[in-house]
Image (spheres, grey):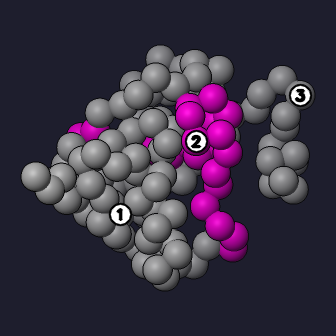
Amino acid sequence: MASERFTLTLEGHGASSGYADERVLVALERAQGFGQIKNMPCRLPVGCRRGGCGICRVRVLAGAYRRDPMSRTHVSVEDEGAGLVLACCIYPLSDLSLRLEPPAAVKGMGQKAIQQG
């Protein structure tokens, strides 16, 4: 049986398809490779792909999703309540509207290090 398909809109950068059994980060990477995600100065921010590094933070502006565990160092309970999640840890349950968010500052890894990396 085919997985349900949804539209993932990245604010200011375009839209693509994502599937209920596919991590949002994977769908966005595929879309960028096919030229559906535009006007970005670089590739999508990607790190560990397992919810531990916090590089792929996004804000869910609209829509429903399910999530895998993610590091509370990078996404606090309060952050999550405000819609902040890690794109590598969420799966769409409906169409999603997303905004890229800079990673939270972490001990020993400031914003400058992330931008240069």
Residues at marks 3 and 2 touching, judged by CB atoms closer than 8 Å: no
- Give the residue at x 21% y 43%: 93
- Give the residue at x 45% y 36%: 89
- Give the residue at x 67% y 45%: 47
Q: In this orientation, which residue lies closer to the viewer: 102 or 1? A: 1
Residues at marks 2 and 1 touching, judged by CB atoms closer than 8 Å: no
The amino acid pointed to by label 2 is: Arg
Which residue position holds label 2? 49
Counting from the top left corner in percent of width and height, residue 10 is at 42, 62
> Which stretch is magenta?
41-65
Between marks 3 and 2, how big is the CA–CA gap?
20 Å
Callout 3: SS: loop
The amino acid pointed to by label 1 is: Thr
- Give the residue at x 85% y 34%: 109
Between marks 3 and 1, how big is the CA–CA gap?
33 Å
Which residue position holds label 3? 108
Residue 69 as seen in the image, left or right of residue 109: left
- For residue 58, the mark is none
Magenta portion: prevailing SS class: loop
Counting from the top left corner in percent of width and height, residue 91 is at 33, 42
Q: In this orientation, which residue lies closer to the viewer: 70 or 12? A: 70
The amino acid pointed to by label 3 is: Gly
Between marks 2 and 1, how big is the CA–CA gap?
20 Å
Dot 2, how many residues are within 10 Å of its Cα: few (below 14), some (14-19), or many (20+)? some
Residue 46 as seen in the image, left or right of residue 70: right
- For residue 9, the mark is 1
Residue 1 as seen in the image, left or right of residue 35: left
Q: In this orientation, which residue lies closer to the viewer: 75 or 69? A: 69
Counting from the top left corner in percent of width and height, residue 11 is at 43, 63
Whichever of callouts 2 and 1 sits on the residue coming sooner in the sequence is: 1
What is the tally of numbered marks visible in this picture?
Answer: 3
Q: Is residue 104 magenta?
A: no
